[in-house]
Image (cartoon, helix red, strand yellow):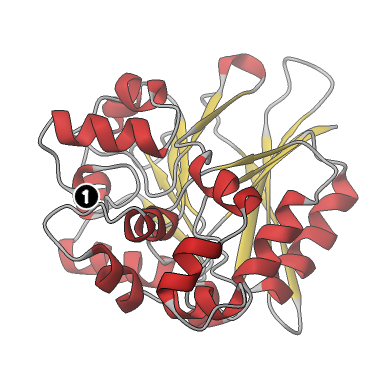
Amino acid sequence: MKNYWIIGDIHGEIRLLDRLLEQILTYDPAEIVFLGDYIDRGPHSKEVVDRIMGLKVPTVCLMGNHEWMMLNAMEDSGFGYNPMELWYLNGGEATLHSFGFSGFFSFQSQMEDRYMDFFRNLRLSCTIQLQNKVKILATHAGISPTIPVADHSGLKNYRELQQYMVEKHLGQDDSFLWVRDAFFSSSPDLWNGCVVVHGHTPVLKLKRFIHTNGQEHFHFVENDLCMRRGGRQGRIVSVDIDSGSTISGRLTGLGFFEKDSPASRITMKGITATYEEIFPRNLGPLSSNH
């Protein structure tokens, strides 16, 4: 059974990543998509990047807002703020230490090229075409109403995104790397029938937002993932899989499974890894309408 997996924000938690990958690899995945935020806060950013770079299965690595902050700091490129200070305030010091540096400027001047190539070439989105014309659109934070999906899908890397945002006079919160409230409040019509899978917003934080704003059709699976439907019994339009790794000690992967028959429904599985346990979940069909 062909299957594809998407893994949420890791933040230097190599033990959680190793435990999760051990489970996912037993399914012989056709592809694994990482949603970004490999670095910062947790203690093992370098080990996480090494692990991903060494995988023998097809992978797609997306950029997260933490890689964005690191590159802005490295290149002294800011949007109305001190980029090095912003990165430090969001956990950058843990990344320096993980890569073996005691200070920022030695990190900036001596970082190995292979790591910089990894970060600079991270993709900004990934579309997985499944059976029955179902498309999974993976982005780090979701969909920004400010940037058309077609425009964002056409951007290849960090430098193109930077140029686009400067030309359009956009702030960081307008990007698919940072958006939160505007995405959760927006109409699914914006993403043209795709199922958006994202991280960036810890599910517990999303719970607070939904409670405060009284929104409906967000269905939580504990604090590990959240499925949004387009109406009470409507199709799934987005899934948040950020379990809050460094805060909660939990990391989640979401799998999509195609059966041999094209007429069969696509089913979903979730796996959440903790330091002590594994929580596998059969999440059922993607939607009765797909």
Residue at mark 1 = 172
Q: Nearer the viewer, residue 62 or 182?
A: 62
**Displayed quadrant of residue 259:** top right
Q: Nearer the viewer, residue 90 or 289?
A: 90
Location of residue 7 in the rendering, given as x and y in whole percent from the top left corner = 62, 53
Location of residue 224 in the rendering, given as x and y in whole percent from the top left corner = 54, 67
Residue appearing at x 45%, y 41% in the figure: 139
Whether residue 116 is situated above or below residue 22 in the rendered picture:
above
Q: Amino acid at mark 1?
A: Gln
Residue appearing at x 78%, y 59% in the figure: 21
Left or right, 129 with respect to 148, comes to right
Whether residue 102 is situated above or below residue 49 in the rendered picture:
below
Residue appearing at x 44%, y 56% in the figure: 67
**Displayed quadrant of residue 44:** bottom right
Q: Nearer the viewer, residue 35 or 110?
A: 110
Whether residue 41 is situated above or below residue 178 in the rendered picture:
below
Q: Confirm whether residue 100 shows in the render.
A: yes
Q: Which corner quadrant holds the N terminus?
A: top right
Q: Nearer the viewer, residue 173 or 138?
A: 173
Count all numbered tags in the image, as a single digit.
1
Whether residue 150 is situated above or below residue 60 in the rendered picture:
above
Q: Which corner quadrant holds the C terminus?
A: top right
Residue appearing at x 32%, y 38% in the figure: 143
Element under disc 1 = helix
Location of residue 122 in the rendering, given as x and y in whole percent from the top left corner = 52, 41
Query: What crowding class fits label 1: few (fewer than 14 Cα within 10 Å), some (14-19), or many (20 or more)?
Result: some
**Displayed quadrant of residue 149:** top left
Q: Confirm whether residue 272 shows in the render.
A: no
Location of residue 61 in the rendering, given as x and y in whole percent from the top left corner = 59, 43
